[in-house]
Image (cartoon, rainbow, N blue to C red):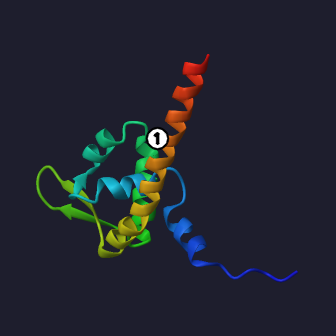
Amino acid sequence: MKSRKPSGIDTAFDVIGGKWKAVILRELQEQPLRFGELKRALPDISEKMLIQQLREMEADGIVHREVFHEVPPRVEYSETKLGATLNAALAPLADWGDRYARRVEAARTRAEAAK
């Protein structure tokens, strides 16, 4: 059996795979955020999962973690240039998702009205 060479989409999904990475990256698109700010912006993610995802994203080079040596210590997360290109690539997918969600909602509304 011939093995398949990984495609670009495989690589992209390896980087953004899972439920949270694209959402975290979107939150960091406008400005750097502290951990607590990210946690408040994403209330459904556990603290453990957010830490894990941020570490993986930093290792992949799409998120930058900056430690400010002050009292109390402050850490901010921001998208890197590579992260910004990924955000730009994800924008059409997000647009598709918005259109699909509206389509599903309209179908549900029609189904409820027909009852």
Q: Quadrant of residue 86?
A: bottom left
In this rendering, position of residue 44 left or right of residue 41: right
- Location of residue 40 (image quadrant): top left
Quadrant housing the N terminus: bottom right
**Residue drawn 69% across the image and 82% down it:** 5
In the displayed structure, would residue 109 be above or below residue 45? above
* Residue located at (45% from left, 45% from top): 48
Q: Nearer the viewer, residue 111 or 101?
A: 111
Number of dots carrying numbers: 1
Residue 44: image x %, image y %?
A: 43, 37
- Residue 54: quarter of image: bottom left
Q: Secondary structure at mark 1?
A: helix
Mark 1 residue type: Arg
Q: Residue at x 22, y 58 (%)?
A: 32
Q: Position of residue 85 (x, y in %)?
A: 36, 73
* Image quarter hosting the C terminus: top right
- Residue 108 position in % (x across, y down): 56, 29
Side of 5 where 49 appears, left or right:
left
Looking at the image, can residue 45 be seen? yes
What is the residue that sits farthest to the front in this orientation? 114
Is residue 21 at least partly visible in the picture? no
Image coords of residue 65 (percent x, y): 29, 64
**Foreground residue among 31 and 109:** 109
Extreme-top residue of the structure? 115
Q: Residues within 10 Å of mark 1 (few under 14, many from 20)?
A: few
Single out the residue that lies furthest toward the right.
Answer: 1
Q: Label 1, on which residue?
A: 102
Q: Residue at x 50, y 34 (%)?
A: 106
